[in-house]
Amino acid sequence: MTESQLRDHLVHEAEGPPFTPIEAAAAIGVGVVSLMAIGVVPVLLGALAEEHRLSQSAIGLAAMLELLSMGLTTGLAGMALKPRRLIAWGVGASLALTGADLVATLAAGPWLLAARAGAGAAEGVLLWITVGMIARTATPERWAGIFFTTQVIAQFVLAVVLGAVIPIWGANGGLVALAGSAALGVVIALGAPKAYPPLPVAPGEGGAPPPRGWFALAVTLVYVAAGGAVAVYLQPLAREAGLDGGVARTALSLSLAAQVAGGAAATALAGRVRYFTVFLMTSATSLTVWWIFSGHPAAWLFIGANMASGLMALFLGPFIVPMTIDADPSRRAGMQSGAAQLFGGALGPLLAAFVVGDRDVHGVLWLGVALLFVGTAGVAWLRFTSRPNATRLASVSREA
């Protein structure tokens, strides 16, 4: 292999034996179960608010608590738990998630917030199992692409189910349907790997990522926060562009189809496209979309721009893990990638609350641009300073 090829080699070979198809599918499946609620949060929490079981202001708080609880659990599990008895962890977390969803049918106000935070903790354990498998594969972007694509399809199916049951049985019908999807995790978890091989640790280091790994996680958080901040204000941006709520809902629905295409494209191009190229493409697309949102586009242009944004968001997702692995070839930072993305998803809307007003939300676009530039600069720094550090850590991996 030439020096140029070594420099461009983004993902080092994983340690340990290969996974069987059933083990890989189950490890991906429990992660899909963990993120089902995230895809239907607007519909479900909106129904709870209409029944006066949550206040309007508590909708955002409930979503944030679940995301933060999930991210914190995923991160702590990656650093503190040994990847053993994974089937038991998967079954136990699925049962706990089912219970939390059912408890929520009896709750309102603070107790409902507590139930969603508890659900987030169980979801975090399931996501830890999935991230652990992806981080140990030789082509994590391919498996992450499969994960993201499957996740979007499953969330779309659940959204259709909720659209049918909530008008008849109310919010509790939606919560029971969500509990049913969590119960499927019990069966799926039975096929998961029993354990993962340990990740290599350099002499004198613990289980936490090295400094470059932490920096990669910070970059992930900032970059994801940029998109999350703008996405949560899609409907107000449409309204201020002179478009009605139906256009925003159509843009959101069609964005799901575009996301499936983006995840599929990432899966097909895994190992053939550098992560830095994908980050640059995503940044350019985001800036163009936000420029369109800042004006008064026609409905078709607004919808098309949001579809492009959704496609690139899912296309980028699978390449975040290779970026962290390039920064930290021991893959310990890669184990925390899911948590960093969840924290970024919660941080974006939180920061946006400080730059928007009741009559003008365009400040969120400037916030998105600022975060995007910071995140892109961080990715560029990691890319162009990676070779010496990657070579050193790769030798640690081979010696471990």
Image: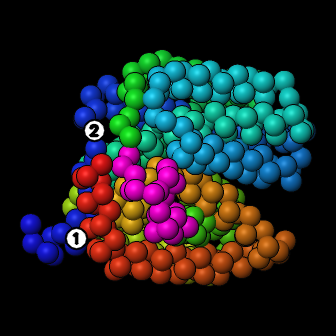
Report if residue 73 lies within the magenta region. Answer: no
Q: Residues within 10 Å of mark 2 (few under 14, many from 20)?
A: few
CA distance separating discs 1 and 2? 24 Å
Q: Is residue 156 left or right of residue 28?
A: right
Q: Residues within 10 Å of mark 1 (few under 14, many from 20)?
A: some
Badge count: 2
- x, y percentage for residue 233? 69, 65
Whether residue 61 is visible to the viewer of this picture, yes or no, is yes
- Under mark 2, the amino acid is Gly
Range drawn in magenta:
199-218
Q: Which residue is mark 2?
A: 16
Residue at 45% x, 44% y is: 131
Say whether disc 1 or disc 2 marks the residue closer to the N-terminus: 1
* Picture quadrant where residue 274 is located: bottom left
Whether residue 254 is visible to the viewer of this picture, yes or no, is no
- Under mark 1, the amino acid is Asp
- x, y percentage for residue 5? 15, 70
- x, y percentage for residue 239? 71, 68
Q: Mark 2: which secondary structure?
A: loop
Q: Assign the magenta stretch its main secondary structure.
A: loop
Disc sitting over residue 8 in the figure: 1
